[in-house]
Image (tube, rainbow, N blue to C red):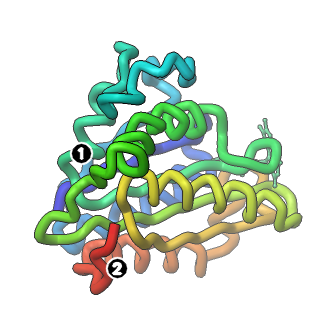
């Protein structure tokens, strides 16, 4: 199944990446065809609220989001991975998410949700935070949920690990890596729920 992976951490070999690699390994084992979008390396401007998408559902801006828009329309599995920065998702992830406002108009105003397709659409959100406080989990989780619903993913799994700060700290929580691997495998199942 075609799977778009949105990597929201700028830190290479950091905790998000290590967790994500396990999820991708699990998904790959179940036949995922993965396209990785390294958001930090892409040219993605923040939404300008220009109104260009209001009547068409198509973003008027021209940058690397065009590749992501295509994947969101055509793929059926989505993984969003982000560290918790200032109690929310990273700026890289948030810029990409905000640019999905065109799908919001398309779904909720133009009443044209993206079709579920034969395999349904499903998602996985992975996040890590250095502190032990749950606000980061809750806030980033709420943003991820809004993202997935906006791109017509009716249901998603979410894994968040707190108290994971220095590069590689996640390796001290081997169950986290196992859970990410299993979540990747599970993502390839056909969901029962098909409502957008
Ligand atoms: C700019 C910045 C803001 C951060 N804000 C938070 C925060 O609000 N809550 C938290 O739990 N950790 C916070 N952290 C810590 C990171 O979430 C933590 O180091 C995480 O493991 C980084 O993931 P990475 O290794 O994938 O980059 C912050 C780190 C940075 C660089």
Q: Is residue 56 above or below residue 135?
A: above
Residue sitting at the far top = 62
| Residue 170 image label | none
| Residue 73 image label | 1
Which residue is painted at 24% across and 59% down in the image?
Answer: 76
Q: 10 Å neighbourhood of mark 1: few (<14), some, or many (≥20)? A: few
Q: Position of residue 150 (x, y in %)?
A: 44, 52
Left or right relative to 98: residue 104: left
CA separation in Å, label 2 and label 1:
21 Å
Q: Is residue 10 above or below residue 33?
A: above
Q: Quadrant of the N terminus?
A: bottom left
Q: Position of residue 50 (x, y in %)?
A: 51, 16
Return the residue nearer the eye: 167 or 151.
151
Q: What is the secondary structure assignment of the residue under circle 2? A: helix
Q: Which residue is mark 2?
A: 186
Kindly report which numbered mark, 2 or 1, lies closer to the viewer in this rendering.
1
Return the residue nearer the eye: 55 or 79.
55
Which residue is painted at 65% across and 67% down in the image?
Answer: 160
Q: Earlier in the sequence, mark 2 or mark 1?
A: 1
Q: What is the secondary structure assignment of the residue under circle 1? A: helix
Which image quarter: residue 24?
bottom left
Q: 10 Å neighbourhood of mark 2: few (<14), some, or many (≥20)? A: some
Q: Position of residue 125 (x, y in %)?
A: 52, 62
């Amino acid at each position: 199944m075609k799977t778009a992976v949105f990597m929201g951490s700028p830190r290479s070999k950091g905790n998000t990446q290590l967790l994500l690699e396990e999820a991708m390994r699990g998904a790959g084992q179940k036949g995922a065809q993965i396209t990785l979008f390294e958001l930090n390396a892409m040219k993605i401007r923040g939404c300008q609220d220009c109104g260009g998408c209001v009547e068409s559902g198509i973003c008027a801006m021209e940058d690397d989001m065009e590749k992501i828009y295509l994947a969101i329309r055509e793929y059926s599995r989505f993984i969003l991975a982000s560290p918790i920065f200032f109690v929310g998702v990273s700026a890289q992830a948030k810029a990409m998410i905000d640019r999905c406002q065109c799908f919001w108009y398309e779904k909720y105003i133009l009443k044209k949700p993206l079709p579920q397709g034969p395999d349904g659409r499903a998602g996985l959100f992975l996040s890590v935070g250095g502190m032990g406080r749950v606000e980061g989990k809750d806030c980033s989780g709420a943003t991820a949920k809004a993202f997935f619903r906006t791109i017509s993913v009716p249901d998603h799994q979410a894994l968040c690990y707190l108290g994971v700060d220095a590069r590689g700290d996640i390796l001290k929580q081997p169950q986290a890596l196992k859970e990410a691997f299993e979540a990747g495998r599970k993502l390839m199942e056909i969901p029962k729920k098909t409502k957008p």
